[in-house]
C-alpha cells in the first residue's frame, strides 16, 4: 500500500513541503491550467480541506500540505482513502477554482450635476445667513448724512432731521454705541437715537416745504 508521502509525491512531480515552496510558486499552481468548476463543487472541495467559501489560493495550498503531512508513512485503508479524497479536491481546486472578488460600491459622480447643485446649496446657505442677520448687515451698509429727514417706518410724516452722528455715543444707560442726533419735527428738540433704531426703524423722506 502506498504511503501518504509517496502519494503526495506522485501528485506533485517535484515533492516539496509547504515551507520549502516559495509563496508565489504555490499561488501560481492554483492559477494555471484552470477549468471552471461549479460553486457547489468548489464549496465541497474547500470543506474537505477545512476551508470556508471564497478561500484564497494561499489558504488552499497551506491547508493541502498541512493535511498531507499529518498522514502516517503507512496509512490504513481508511486513511489512504481520505488522502486520495483530499488530493482530488486539491487537484480540482488548482485547475478550476476562482475565488469571488468583493465588489466595491462605486458611485458615479457627474460633475455636470454636482457643480450646479453645490453652487445652489452654497447660495442658499449664504441667503439664509444674510436673511437671519439682515438688520445687522443693513446697519453697516447704510449711513445718513446731516440734513437727512427721516420718518418712522409705515408713516409719511417727518419724524426728525439728522444734525449729527457719533460712532460711540454714551447713552445714560448701557454701553456706548453709534448714534444719530435728531432735531425732532414736532418741537425742535434734539435727541440722540441709536444707529440701529434709525437704520432699521426709519426711512428718509422729502423735507416738508
Image (spheres, rainbow, N blue to C red):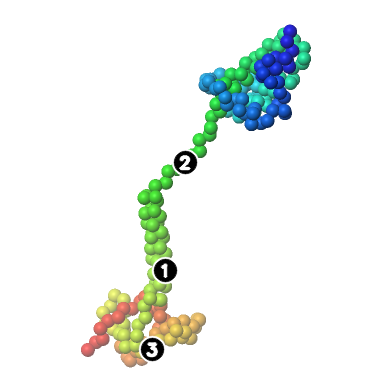
Residue under pointer 1: 133
Please tell me in which quadrant of the rendered image residue 42 appears.
top right
Q: Are marks 2 and 3 in contact (CB under 8 Å)?
A: no
Residue 184 seen = no
Of tags 2 and 3, the one toward the viewer is 2
Q: Nearer the viewer, residue 5 or 112?
A: 5
Q: Is residue 19 above or below residue 120?
A: above
Whether residue 16 is visible: yes
Q: Residue at label 3?
A: 164
Q: Position of residue 120 (x, y in %)?
A: 37, 56
Sequence-wise, the earlier of marks 2 and 3 is 2
> Which element is circle 1 on?
loop
| Badge 1 or badge 2: first in the primary sequence | 2
Question: Residue sitting at 65 percent across and 25 percent down?
Answer: 61
Residues at marks 1 and 2 touching, judged by CB atoms closer than 8 Å: no
Tell me the residue at 29%/75% (across/down).
Answer: 154
Image quadrant in which the N terminus is located: top right
* Closer-to-camera residue (190/11): 11
Q: Find disc 2 in the rendering and name its residue.
A: 106
Amino acid at each position: 500500500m502506498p504511503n501518504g508521502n509517496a502519494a503526495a509525491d506522485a501528485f506533485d512531480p517535484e515533492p516539496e513541503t509547504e515551507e520549502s515552496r516559495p509563496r508565489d510558486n504555490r499561488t501560481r499552481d492554483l492559477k494555471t491550467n484552470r477549468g471552471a468548476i461549479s460553486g457547489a463543487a468548489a464549496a465541497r472541495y474547500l470543506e474537505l480541506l477545512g476551508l470556508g467559501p471564497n478561500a484564497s489560493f494561499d489558504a488552499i495550498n497551506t491547508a493541502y500540505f498541512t493535511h498531507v503531512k499529518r498522514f502516517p508513512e503507512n496509512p490504513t485503508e481508511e486513511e489512504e482513502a481520505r488522502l486520495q479524497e483530499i488530493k482530488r479536491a486539491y487537484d480540482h481546486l488548482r485547475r478550476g477554482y476562482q475565488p469571488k472578488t468583493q465588489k466595491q460600491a462605486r458611485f458615479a459622480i457627474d460633475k455636470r450635476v454636482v457643480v450646479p447643485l453645490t453652487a445652489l446649496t452654497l447660495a442658499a446657505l449664504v441667503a439664509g445667513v444674510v436673511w437671519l442677520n439682515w438688520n445687522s448687515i443693513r446697519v453697516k451698509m447704510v449711513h445718513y448724512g446731516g440734513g437727512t429727514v427721516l420718518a418712522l417706518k409705515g408713516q409719511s410724516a417727518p419724524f426728525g432731521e439728522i444734525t449729527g452722528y457719533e460712532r460711540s455715543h454714551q447713552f445714560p444707560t448701557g454701553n456706548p454705541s453709534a448714534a444719530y442726533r435728531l432735531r425732532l419735527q414736532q418741537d425742535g428738540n434734539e435727541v440722540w437715537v441709536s444707529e440701529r433704531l434709525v437704520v432699521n426703524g426709519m426711512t428718509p423722506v422729502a423735507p416738508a416745504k
